[in-house]
Amino acid sequence: MMKPYKSGNRVVWKCPKCGYVEDASTAVSLIEKTVIEHKPDEKPVVITKVTENLPKVKVTCPRCGNNEAYFWVQQTRAADEPPTRFYRCTRCGYTWREYE
């Protein structure tokens, strides 16, 4: 993937692997990709044992078609974004999530 670099007073595209250089065009928009590395303590917690304390709702299971599931809400993204709703089918135990 070509990356933009400054060469004197101009911007050029340069391949970090082979060193190929090409003049940058102002008509091309730049897209930056960042890989986020997660630490072990940042992994989401998945509940493996459903207790009777979880509420039930009427929602269709995408796997078996059952119309009842347990649900819980968990903040999986930044604090300024809405939480994620998790569902677990009362019949087959399939777990899925729904973003608000």
Image (cartoon, rainbow, N blue to C red):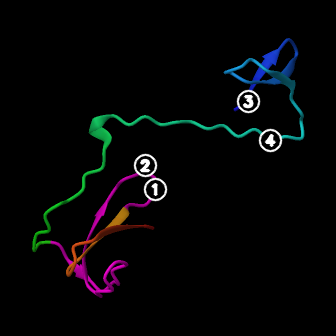
**Which residue is labeled 1 in the image?**
81
Asked whether the beta carbons under mark 4 and mark 2 sit within 8 Å of each other, the answer is no
Q: Disc 4 and disc 3: Cα gap in Å?
A: 13 Å
Work out whether mark 4 precedes mark 2 in sequence or the reverse, and give the earlier one. 4
Identify the residue at image location x=68%, y=21%: 16
Instruction: Point out the image quarter for the C terminus.
Output: bottom left
Asked whether the beta carbons under mark 3 and mark 1 sit within 8 Å of each other, the answer is no
Q: Disc 2 and disc 1: Cα gap in Å?
A: 6 Å
Identify the residue at image location x=37%, y=78%: 62
Q: Disc 2 and disc 3: Cα gap in Å?
A: 31 Å
Question: 86 above or below 25?
Answer: below
Question: 15 above or below 8?
Answer: below
- Range of the magenta residues? 54-83
Q: Amino acid at mark 2?
A: Ala
**Which residue is labeled 3 in the image?**
2
Disc sitting over residue 78 in the figure: 2
**Which residue is labeled 4 in the image?**
29
Which mark is in front, 4 or 2?
Answer: 4
